[in-house]
Image (tube, rainbow, N blue to C red):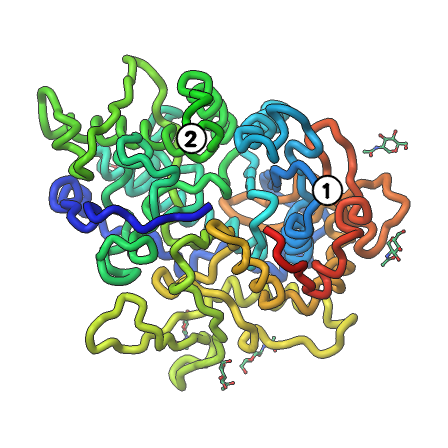
Amino acid sequence: MQFSSLPNRLSRWQWAGLASLFVIAFITVIQYPASTTRSDPISVWKNADSSKISGPVSKFHLLLPASGYHFRLCRALASATALGYPVSVLNGWMKEGGLDASKTHLAKVRTVMQYLDSLPASSDDDLVLMIDGYDVVFQIPPDVLIDRYFAITKAASAKLALRYGANSTESLKGDDMPQQTILFGPEKVCYPVDWSRVGCWAVPQDIGIPHGAFGPDDGQLQHSLPRWLNSGTIMGPAKDMRLMFAATLERIAQHYDPIHEFSDSDQMYMSDVWGVQEYARSMEELRQYFHGDIDPNVAFPTFNVEKVLPNVLPGQKTEYHIGIDHRSALFQTRAGSDHVLSMLTYNETTEANETTTFATVTQNVPESPNFNPYKIYLPSNLASSITRILRLVEPAVGAIPNVTELRLETNLVTKNVYGLFHSTGGKDYIDKLWTQLWFFPYVRPLFEAMVPALQAGRPIAVADGRTWVPYHTLSSNSSVTQGVNATGAWADIDGGWLSWQELCGAFEAEVFDGYTPPMDD
Ligand SMILES: *[C@@H]1O[C@H](CO)[C@@H](O)[C@H](O)[C@H]1NC(C)=O
Ligand SMILES: *[C@@H]1O[C@H](CO)[C@@H](O)[C@H](O)[C@H]1NC(C)=O
Ligand SMILES: *[C@@H]1O[C@H](CO)[C@@H](O)[C@H](O)[C@H]1NC(C)=O
Ligand SMILES: *[C@@H]1O[C@H](CO)[C@@H](O)[C@H](O)[C@H]1NC(C)=O
Ligand SMILES: *[C@@H]1O[C@H](CO)[C@@H](O)[C@H](O)[C@H]1NC(C)=O
Ligand SMILES: *[C@@H]1O[C@H](CO)[C@@H](O)[C@H](O)[C@H]1NC(C)=O
């Protein structure tokens, strides 16, 4: 998918209007200092016997929509296994017709819906992470990803509570009250581009990052803010995900037009479900100030384009708890972001504080006059989680590096060592990235080391007052119980076990040796 540069009118956006209503120090709310870390990953690992868990337990599901074999799918699976993510489910595996993702992107919505519908009510509060199967790799372990998920969604829900007139930051209660529980990846342009579409114009004005932070505000894609929704990476509770996917299918049923150029773009329908949510939220907010008719063309001061207004019926559900990971703490999309990504080594300390390491950034992304190099600190929970994983392979590989020697790809603007990379807009970047990832030299020994935990369904994290265990474990049926051949994935809800050999046996050079076939896209 290719993006052209944004229309010039972007640079003429007026921000004064609605933005002044949202005077919240979002940047300070959304940051998650190391002190919020709820778990010491090393002790989680030590107390890994499931029978000894005290307190509530929830499950973590990893879904990869994928219809057939590919080396990039195997790299995605390998990054998940090496870092200790739950065993994956491949949604739409070898399915046909409307469930075949190689024929229509809508297959993803249908097959993930089938999966969510199959879950029992006891799974409603489980966490589901869905990632596109063919262009994603993980960079950070699941305990830190889950920590970040809760830090971001709780901060966003607190901000929403203030915005809707409550006198506390306590999350609003009720399925139809504004909250944030579902996180999508960010996109730097509304795609598919159609500025009359509600998912393009009704989006939040304030994303907590000032204009110009990614470069001069000149309308170019790479300089624009990551304001829009990307549907390739989604994380949220099973129940809310089910409602959101159902709303997307309903929108498809109502708006599907076979001759529309993007009729099979799942992202178009999902971003419009979000757009309607944002439209309804904003109108609700405006009613607190304007006690009469509200003109949406004035209320949404964006674009010189005729807006297609959503037809929201009285009592219609519009609130789906959807939000965007604008700061790429979890999800780093590629399109328009190459210039803010850098492999940093967090090997500097100050004399005053030798325990906290940082990297110094000398790249002037915003093109500021009199630019001063700045520091990005390595979060302590990430440092200890990576160290724990490296120690697992120490017996097999001998000397392991210190986390301060690793190169970690970092978003220089939002200062996050992102959780996973999603290669929108061309696959060349992710193909080069694979051998650069910190764990690449250890993928095979990490597979070996992770197998016992993945077989036993050992705890992954402690967060939100709950212990997180994988929903899916390795097949206990497998005749092989050790090493890469014991790993694999589950096909949909009915397709059974797919062994590593079957899925990826033909791609081991691509996974373990970093070989990339020429001209494959
Ligand atoms: C405001 O906060 C106080 C103290 O927490 C509480 O008793 C009261 O019900 C709240 N009022 C509203 C309108 O939420
Ligand atoms: C820190 O990392 C950078 C980048 O890899 C390297 O050039 C530098 O020598 C390292 N410094 C120390 C003290 O190891
Ligand atoms: C070092 O920095 C970290 C993170 O900013 C902080 O938690 C810690 O207390 C500091 N240690 C000292 C000795 O100042
Ligand atoms: C990594 O290096 C730092 C600084 O030299 C040191 O304090 C720390 O103990 C080392 N960590 C490990 C796991 O070796
Ligand atoms: C385990 O193997 C048996 C016999 O081959 C098969 O019937 C069953 O479906 C398998 N179960 C799983 C979970 O793969
Ligand atoms: C995995 O299975 C394949 C096919 O049976 C075999 O050739 C390979 O040696 C096995 N790998 C390991 C590490 O045992």
Instruction: Choose between 340 and 349: the one closer to the eye.
Output: 340
The image shows residue 37, relative to residue 256, as above or below, that is below
Percent position (x, y) of residue 35?
43, 61
Image-based side of 4 in relation to 167, left or right: right
Percent position (x, y) of residue 25?
23, 52
The amino acid on which the numbered mark 1 sits, given as a three-letter code, is: Ala
Image-based side of 47 in relation to 315, left or right: right
Label number found at residue 261: 2
The residue where tag 1 is placed is 489
Label 2 packing within 10 angstroms: few (<14), some (14-19), many (20+): few
Can the viewer see residue 409? Answer: yes
Instruction: Choose between 318 and 465: the one closer to the eye.
Output: 318
Q: Secondary structure at mark 1?
A: strand
Instruction: Choose between 125 and 6: the one closer to the eye.
Output: 6
Percent position (x, y) of residue 398?
75, 77
Q: Secondary structure at mark 2?
A: loop
Give the spatial CA distance, label 1 vs label 2.
34 Å
Can the viewer see residue 120? Answer: no
- Residue furthest to the right: 479
Task: Give the image quarter of residue 36.
Answer: bottom left
The image shows residue 192, relative to residue 248, as above or below, that is below
Image-based side of 51 in relation to 486, left or right: left
